[in-house]
Amino acid sequence: MVRYLLRRVIQFFGVLLIISFVSFLIMRLLPGDPVVKHLGTSYTTENARLFEHQVGLDQGFFAQYFTWLGHIVTFNWGTSWTVSPGKANSTILAESLPPTLLILTMSQILGLVIAIPTAVAVVRRPNGRLDRSANAIMLGAYSIPTIVALPILTYVLTVKYNFLPGPSAWNSSVSVVAPQNLKVAVLPAIAIAISSLAGHFRFLRNDMIINLQEDFVVMARSKGLRDGRILWRHVLRPSSVTLLTSLGLTISGLIVGSFVVETFLSIPGFASWLLPAVDTSDFGLLQMLVMTVAFLVIGIQMLINSLLPLIDPRIARD
């Protein structure tokens, strides 16, 4: 088990290092001159050279990379160049990360709350009427992208019935978990959860049907255990390996979905800084945001891989 976790940690930092180099290289290929965008009308040759020296753009590529990498490791993330000149990137991260994490967490809780009971219910009679109906609904939900679901939900839940607050309702002056902001986060959470819950349902359903054919289920039934007890206590646990895998596979798509809903609903999350940073070539801010997303995606994957052996110890065997 220890060796298994150690390998995962080494892989985690190795992948992060590769992503850091590739993203650093790609950003230098973005169109536009960050010096010109930063200085604007005050651009002069002297000012340009001074700014390049201040931020290290006058160094070679590898010197810039290793200097930036050292700053990242020591949590010296610098300040924004163009999007919010002089504002610490760490402050930007502290302000933008909580709304995004709130929406992602709520969407996954909503998805699991619907997917797990539905999967348990339909496997009682595989290919029965309930199973076929649920599969058809989930297949339809899976085919609806967030960018399509969000306007429809906004019209129905906000414009027509006024159940939930709409765009620009987020209040940055209060806590992220304040009732007002929690209510705002419900709509984007539903929009993101629609496609992910369908994937969770199908993964869990298929694995539970397979596990129902195992010998331990036959033995449990021979002891007179009820079907509900067998499904929830004996079949759901080994099938949770597939469910956790599904959670890991969908995390990157969920983050992309959060960018869509944050932009549409004017929520001050990652998207409110990422898109302007790309547009203005604010390398310092952009690199920090990219690495934060990479850290979240790979970190969640590693966490899930660490949990899998607890469910099925055979996974950790060499």
Image (spheres, helix red, strand yellow):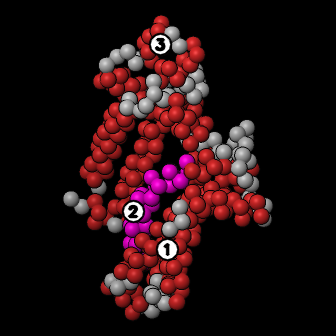
Q: Nearer the viewer, residue 221 or 40?
A: 40
Task: Residue 51: say if magenta.
Answer: no
Mark with earlier residue (3, 1): 3
Q: Judging from the image, what secondary structure is the residue with disc 1 in?
A: helix
Mark nearest the camera among 1 and 2 is 1
As drawn, which residue projects farthest toward the left? 318
Q: Position of residue 76 (x, y in %)?
A: 46, 24
Residue 147 position by quadrant? bottom right
Mark with earlier residue (1, 2): 1
78 relative to 195, above or below: above
Residue of label 2: 245
Tally of numbered discs: 3
Q: Nearer the viewer, residue 314 or 69?
A: 69
Instruction: Kindly tell me whether residue 228 is visible in this rendering.
Output: no
Q: Which residues are magenta?
A: 235-259
10 Å neighbourhood of mark 2: few (<14), some, or many (≥20)? some
Mark 3 and mark 1: span between their CA atoms? 55 Å
Task: Residue 237: say if magenta.
Answer: yes
Residue lying at 45% horizontally and 46% vertically, measured from the top left: 296
Residue of label 3: 48
Residue 118 position by quadrant? bottom right
Task: Say whether marks 3 and 2 touch (CB < 8 Å).
Answer: no
Residue of label 1: 139
Task: Say whether marks 3 and 1 touch (CB < 8 Å).
Answer: no
